[in-house]
Amino acid sequence: MSEATTAAGSASGQPTRIALLKVLGPVHVWALGVGIVLVGEFMGWNFSVGKGGAYGSLIACWVVGLLYTCVAMIDSEVTSTVAAAGGQYTQAKHIVGPLMAFNVGLYLVMAYTMLEAGDALVVGDLMKAVAGELGHADLDPRPFVVLSIALLAWLNYRGVFMTLTVNFVITAAAFLAIVILFVGVSPWEPAKVLLHKDLLVDLPYGWIGVIAAMQFAMWYYLGIEGTCQAAEEVRSAGRSIPLGTMSGMITLLIAASLTWYVAAGLMPWEYLGQAITPLYDAAKLTGSGTLQVILFVGTIFSAIASANGCINDASRAWFSMGRDRYLPTWFGAVHPRYRTPYRAILFLIPIAVVFAFQAPLDQVISFSILSGLLGYTFMSFNMMKFRKQWPLGSIKRGYVHPFHPLPAIVLLVLCIATYFATFLGYGATLVAVMAFYILASAWFVFHRYKFVRRGDQFTMPWPRPKGY
């Protein structure tokens, strides 16, 4: 096999490209989107409490929820129309141009790879914490980090249908764990277990704290846009992408609200704002051994589901860039038996392991958040240009999101606010991330661009853009 082709010829005698399998339905899209994100309900979101207090975190949760609702609506329209692996990268390739496409592809790969590293760290830290409670405080978490990434890479290597079916099962189990914890703290009897009256205080840092909290409030939803990476492998993009993405967003809004309510009613905001596994800690505070076991399993499942989805999405973006010659074409290969982008999967695994071992968790999270945020900023401009170049009625769309251009405008405004929030807490990281992408852009322009075949970029059967 040469790159993405097979030696077996077509009926005409020409080599044929091995395609990814179209085997996924809406439930797999839901499992991919929610599976990547749900770990954010078990850890990471609570750092927003440290920035803005419990009430500030809740306000940021709902505001950022609006941001991601806009992302889900925009993605559902464009992806159901540009149904190809690579998601937002492929959208940028068709609507904007090569340099933007390269950057968006890189945003996707780095956001998911960093998130995968964070997930693996959570698995290792949780295993060490439980071992410490059992009298084995010297347990080394690193083997668990490597083992979890290696097993998930093997699963992704063997096939997307099995990968996302497993993700559906463990993601549903993790979501059920949040619901069980909510029921277990007897919310209908607030004073019995929950102590909101005693623990909730006014905004400790005022409204500037609420803005600062928006950075980590993204952790409630970061990754839902990953549903776009399944576009080339779903049976019906016009049905599966919008249904799976929007139902996933509804699931996350419910999970985020339940998570905040339980955690804020059991822990002071000062502790909650720096906890590593807040929902597991909440289960311990209830005094119920059963709830503690359920939340331990739920936390492990959520981290594994997230890492599993991240490997899937990062590899699709990297594979698509290789297939289009934005990266060496060696990465554009499809496994002849399993029909997966196996080289992209294997290449990205050691990168995730290195970041998991070498970078602090909050820095890994911040890098992932900023990479995702750059991608969301692109979406707002991309949606405007997409509707302008191909107005409604000019091409067939699988889904048309309402209220345009309001979602794109709201998304851009909220992205700007979140950049400011990130600058308040992680200004150096923000500068470092921007410098990294500027250098990557320079590498693409001065070195890699000459390998790109401009005539092969536009693959959609659309009419010329309006005003072309």
Image (cartoon, rainbow, N blue to C red):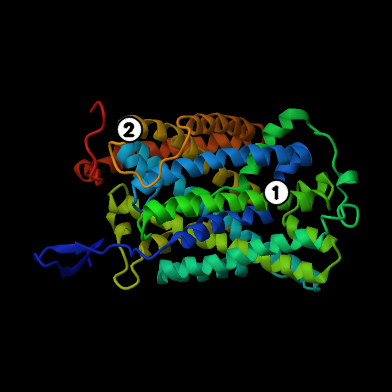
Toward the left, the furthest residue is: 12
Residue at (60% x, 35% y) in the render: 428
Q: Quadrant of residue 122?
A: bottom right
Q: Is residue 348 or residue 295 the one in the foreground?
A: 295
In three-dimensional space, the C-alpha distance between marks 2 and 1, rounded to whole angstroms, equals 37 Å
Q: Indicate the amino acid at tag 1.
A: Ser
In the rendered image, residue 170, in percent from the top left (x then y), is placed at 59, 67
Left or right, 244 with respect to 221, comes to left
Residue depicted at 55% across the width and 29% down the height = 413
Q: Is label 2 in a helix, a strand or a loop?
A: loop
Q: Which residue is mark 2?
A: 391
Q: Residue furthest top?
A: 467
x and y percentages locating residue 248 in the rendered image? 55, 53
Q: Secondary structure at mark 1?
A: helix
- Name the residue: 82% across, 44% down: 270
Task: Give amino acid for label 2.
Answer: Pro
Please state the horizontal and vertical placement of residue 10, each as a whole percent of the image: 14, 66
Left of 61 or right of it: where is 348?
A: left
Residue that badge 1 annotates = 257
Residue 260 image offset from top left, x and y in percent: 74, 49
Q: Is residue 359 visible?
A: no
Q: How many marks?
A: 2
Mark identifier at residue 460 = none
- Location of the C terminus (image quadrant): top left
Whether label 2 touches label 1, CB < 8 Å: no
Which image quarter holds the N terminus?
Answer: bottom left
Count neighbours of disc 2 (C-alpha within 10 A) and say few if under 14, some if 14 to 19, many if 20 or more: few
